[in-house]
Image (cartoon, rainbow, N blue to C red):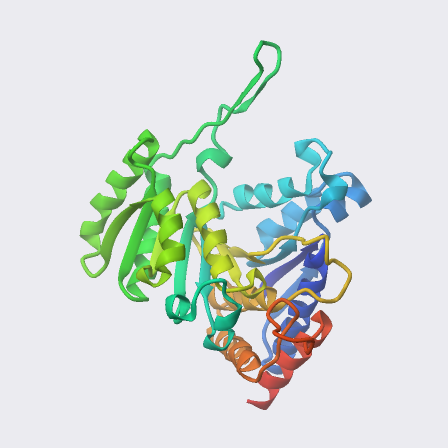
Amino acid sequence: MTKKILILPGDGIGQEVTKSAVEVLNFVTEKFNLAFSITSLEVGGTAYDKCGSPIPDEVLKSAKEADAVLFGAVGGPKWDQLEWDDRPENALLTLRKELNLFANLRPAFLFDELSGASPLKESVIKGLDILIVRELTGGIYFGEPRGVIDDVKPNYAFNTMIYNEDEITRIAKVAFESAQKRKGKLCSVEKANVLEVSKFWRSIVTEMSADYPDVELSHQLADNTAMQLVLNPNQFDVIVASNLFGDILSDIAATLTGSIGMLPSASLDSSFKGMYEPCHGSAPDIAGKNIANPIAMIASLSMALRYSLNAEAISDKIDAAIKKFVQNGYRTIDIATDDNFLNTSEVSKKIINIIENE
């Protein structure tokens, strides 16, 4: 059965790194005779400039029909003054919500060869391998009511943090099952000391733990987890958190690896259809310079092959190629220790060559 893949390069370096991932995708599709139907459309600020919407109807329709969406990045100063409905970032949140991509998987791992790139001491960071499971379609980012009140003095703004039992249960299930496949440790993160919604979150996750006796469950307050990620990151295996806390903690974890340009992510629905994107943004300051690191986007492609496209063996080959790429001493500018680095457009060729010769 043919699997449908939608490519959404977006803005800034999203276009450059997505091009690299598509080169790898086209190579493995042909080499391994994979049954893929691949479509590419514009999204974000690039789409707004051409048709007046950051997420045209065709994009949303195609995304709903796709088995996997490869999403580059959106946004940039050019569009910062637009109203929210026209902002590039609205496209990303709309896709997450409309596709019901409630489970965001963000691994943070460190190749031993790159330990010098981390801001932490090697003795602290060596062996880093964390998975953050972030709830993606609920919480304060989507809660209602919300708004800005400017017809009274003083003006004020408000947002609502809200989770129902089903939303917490389904993300905790993903986290528990992920822990079962890893080291068997799950840390649930919230602010149960001050927030009712967090107390509710903790009670549900605690109750669910009885169904997973092989997983060691712990609880931590979000501010403490942020500190512990810097002091002793290897105490963690899987972390599960709400939309807001997961957003913050996954960015901290990504920074520990020395470059956010190395880290992929997957956002999944209940049937494992998903959207795959690098953890970095559109980086307009380096866009068009051919120096962005496309490894995170290529690794995101690997996650798509593993979770949504029934091609786990090919995913393994890409992961192995990325590992060998690093072991062979190839570097992009963000992880280079000298002036000897590859440009964006050169990376995919190296990855393809490694796969071809294995």
Q: Is residue 122 above or below residue 96?
A: below
At x 68%, y 57%, the residue is: 14
Give the percent coordinates (x, y) of residue 26. Answer: 66, 73
- Of the 4 image quadrants, the one containing the C terminus is bottom right
- Please identify the residue farthest to the bottom as the structure is shown: 357
Instruction: Tell which of 57 and 278 is nearer to you.
Output: 278
Q: Which residue sits furthest right?
A: 50
Q: Is residue 334 left or right of residue 316?
A: right
In the foreground, 313 or 337: 337
94 to the left or right of 247: right
Residue 267 % position (x, y): 50, 53
The part of the image, by quadrant, that contains residue 232 is bottom left
Residue with the most extreme front position = 121
Residue ID at (44%, 36%)? 139
The image position of residue 221, as x and y in percent, is 32, 43
In the rendered image, is residue 131 in sight? yes
Where is residue 289, by image quadrant?
A: bottom right
Count of marks overlaid on the render: 0
Relative side of 97 to 292, left or right = left
The quadrant of the picture occupied by the N terminus is bottom right
